[in-house]
Image (spheres, helix red, strand yellow):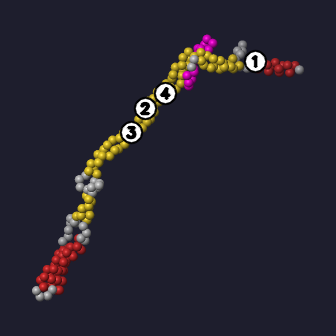
Amino acid sequence: MKRLITAGLFATTLLGAQAQTFNDNARVRSAEPQYENVSVPRNECTNHWINEHERGGRGAYERQTQNQDRNYGGAIVGGLAGGVIGHQIGGGAGKDAATALGVVLGAIAGDRMENNQQPRVQYDSGPAETVQREVRRCRTVYDTQTRITGYKVTYDYRGQTQTTFMRTNPGNNLSVRVTVDPVEQ
């Protein structure tokens, strides 16, 4: 039984020595906002008009040109061959006319064979046109913004002044948690 009484007294002592916690109100003296500077990126875009020179636009036209480097060897050889053939075909007074006609037709045939008689096609728009075009240019710009990070709060509780940092402004009163611990001597 003695043991039971000792255990009970020991448990009561432990419970009495335990800290007690409760909530109370304190009067706020000041709440000073605390700031920080933050660099915030943003896109800044501008539009510019530029002049461009354009070829082959709506006014383009087709121009046929002859080969610049003509070969006359085919016309000469064709004319000689045509003259020989025309001279053999013709007879009497028509022999000279047949020879002349053979020379002309042979020269034309030889020239076509030599130079392939297909004109080159080139596209030419004439003078260049100036056209305006809008160009958009963007760049990242950093703006410095000041933001409130919280409040430095000074408050009075039972004659003592305390300071703490809070995320929000508490107003005129601040709820505080009070812990009472016995002091051992």
Q: Which mark is residue 16?
A: 1
> Circle 1 sits in a helix, a strand or a loop, which is it?
helix
- Percent across and percent down for residue 184 are 72, 15
Q: Quadrant of residue 143?
A: top left
Disc 2 marks a residue whose amino acid type is: Asp
From which residue to which does the magenta span run? Answer: 155-170
79, 56: nearer the viewer? 56
Q: Main secondary structure of the magenta part?
A: strand
N-terminal label among 4 and 3:
3
> Circle 3 sits in a helix, a strand or a loop, which is it?
strand
Comparing labels 3 and 1, the label whose residue is closer to the camera: 3
Q: Is residue 125 toward the left or the right of residue 99 in the image? A: right
Q: CA distance from mark 4 to mark 3?
A: 26 Å
Q: Residue furthest top?
A: 159
Q: Is residue 16 visible?
A: yes
Q: Which residue is mark 2?
A: 143
Q: CA distance from mark 1 to mark 2?
A: 59 Å
Q: Which residue is mark 4?
A: 147
Q: Residue furthest front?
A: 58
